Image: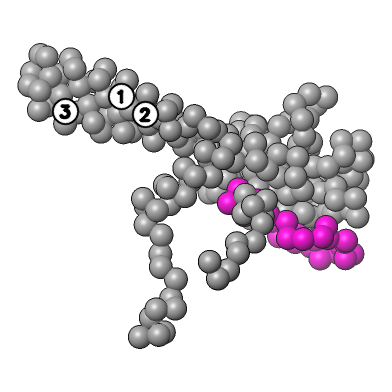
Amino acid sequence: MARNASKPKKQGGLSKLRAAYRMTKEHDKHIGLICLAWFLGVGLLVGLPVGWFFHWAAGVVLGLPSGWLAALVVFGRRAQNSAYAQVEGRPGAAAAALSVLKRGWQVQPAVSVTKNQDLVHRVVGRPGVILVGEGNPGRVRNLLAVEKKKHARVVGEVPIYDLVVGEDGDGALPVKRVAKHIMKLPRNIAPADVTDLLQRLKALDAMRPQVPIPKGPMPTSMKQARSAMRGPTPRGR
């Protein structure tokens, strides 16, 4: 009995939605009213004509799910923007933003780190190698140039892209645009070549000396980044 009681309960869909709503509301105060407006607007826009021309029951059946779907889409987008806003400017923000890249992308956070907490992350995919730097713009650009030369020695003719994450302007990309920018890059190599490329990059990483890691855990996902900023959860309450 005690063993079963100690097992953590799995979060259901509604529990996760409530948790996401609470986190989003911390930054987006009017998220509830905005989602409600979309729910009512789209629901009425779909349901009223159907109910008028056919039957009120059909209008309700089509209007409610249409409004709910619209509210969920709007909530998802605003929740993502809120998450980006919460992590922007923090060490590891770019790594957290890259965590949305899933199938077909290989993300390696912090392949290069300095004692000043300037970081370079690496993404490998069909475009080739993408080096993503975050930290002080001047220092990061120098760090990216060094990493680009190192990678060029082992990847051959595979294209290497580099970008700096920071405040919008001066050639830097804001956190919220990083993943979209990478996914829009041209497909330069075949999927089979990606596997060979990853093997060559493993050899490069094996030759790296130990680098100074910034103090504290570096978040590598949006969820971890938000949790790190809220701090440890008090126990015994």
The reply to whether callout 2 and callout 1 are in contact (CB within 8 Å) is yes
Image disc number at residue 29: none
- Colouring chosen for the image of the structure: one colour
State how many labels appear.
3
**Element type at mark 1:** helix
In the image, which is nearer the foreground, mark 3 or mark 2? 2
Magenta-drawn segment: 197-225
- Say which label, 3 or 1, has the lower sequence index: 1
Q: Amino acid at mark 1?
A: Leu
In the image, which is nearer the foreground, mark 3 or mark 1? 1
Label 1 sits on residue: 40
> What distance separates the C-alpha of mark 3 from that of mark 1?
12 Å
Label 2 sits on residue: 36
Determine if residue 137 is in view.
Answer: yes
Measured as percent of width and height from the top left, residue 65 is found at 25, 33
Q: Is residue 45 in the magenta section?
A: no
Q: Residue at x 58, y 51 (%)?
A: 223
Give the quadrant of residue 168: top right
Q: Amino acid at mark 2?
A: Leu
Q: Is residue 175 above or below residue 53?
A: below
The reply to whether callout 3 and callout 1 are in contact (CB within 8 Å) is no
Label 3 sits on residue: 60
